[in-house]
Amino acid sequence: MPVNRDLWNEPLSRNYTPNWHCSICGGGNLRLAAESLHALATAESIRQQDHPAWDADWSKLRFSAMLKCNNHACMESATIAGKGRVEMVQTSDHDYDYVEFYTPEFFKPSPTLILIPKECPGEVIDQLQQAFVASWGDASASANHIRMAVERLLDHIKQPRTRISPKGKRELLSLHKRIEGLASRDKQLSDSLLAVKWLGNAGSHSDSLSREEYSTHSIHLNQHFKHCSPRTGKRLKCL
């Protein structure tokens, strides 16, 4: 399953919108709605304008905008907000101009950052969609939603949540134990889910998980998620 990490990294401008796919129809791309982009300089940038060496490319911005799906059968709208910067760019052989570039830190509904097959359980899709939204501004929270997606996937394939203790009492199994128990049914899936689970733990207990770590490891690992349908017995690519 291809992953386009440029979806996180490519900036928006008033004249250019990255090819963010519409998560509602799946067939269109989100485009900047006319006159919807608003940007203001940060307080720090305003103070720096008094510096004798100040130049426009020192500017730091905050922005918000609306996007609209270009599929006329859909026309879904999305809200984005985040940070901006100003860069000098070459406009012709001898001319230069200052252009504002904007990087989303909030995006809802978010583009689907990995393709989710139709067979994927709804409860897993819900957690992934929340992970997509969080990934723009909080990679650690996004990783935590992926960890929860693992839980929902195990529920779907009927992996036990409890066991009977040596004393005869029913006790809850940790996520780690549930995944380990899956190895007797599907070792490859168990190994993949353990890797994703550890990333989710990092997201739950650390504020230092970077967007690059998230996009490089978590989305890559999710390409290997599979589940076995209890109704059909077929192996289906889930994530």
Image: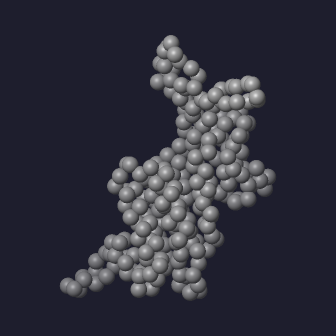
- Where residue 88 sits, quadrant-wise, is top right
Q: Residue at x 46, y 72 (%)?
A: 192
Q: Nearer the viewer, residue 10 or 229?
A: 10
The quarter of the picture where the N terminus appears is bottom right
**In x, y percent, where is residue 158?**
46, 81
Residue 62 visible: yes
Q: Residue furthest front?
A: 93
Q: Residue furthest left?
A: 167
| Viewer can see residue 158 | no
Q: Residue at x 53, y 81 (%)?
A: 228
Residue drawn at the location 76% of the way across and 29% of the way down: 92
In the image, residue 233 lies at what x, y percent? 56, 87
Q: Position of residue 55 (x, y in %)?
A: 56, 20
Residue drawn at x 73%, y 24% is 95
Q: Is residue 160 left or right of residue 34?
A: left
Q: Quadrant of the C terminus?
A: bottom right
Q: How is the image coloured?
A: one colour
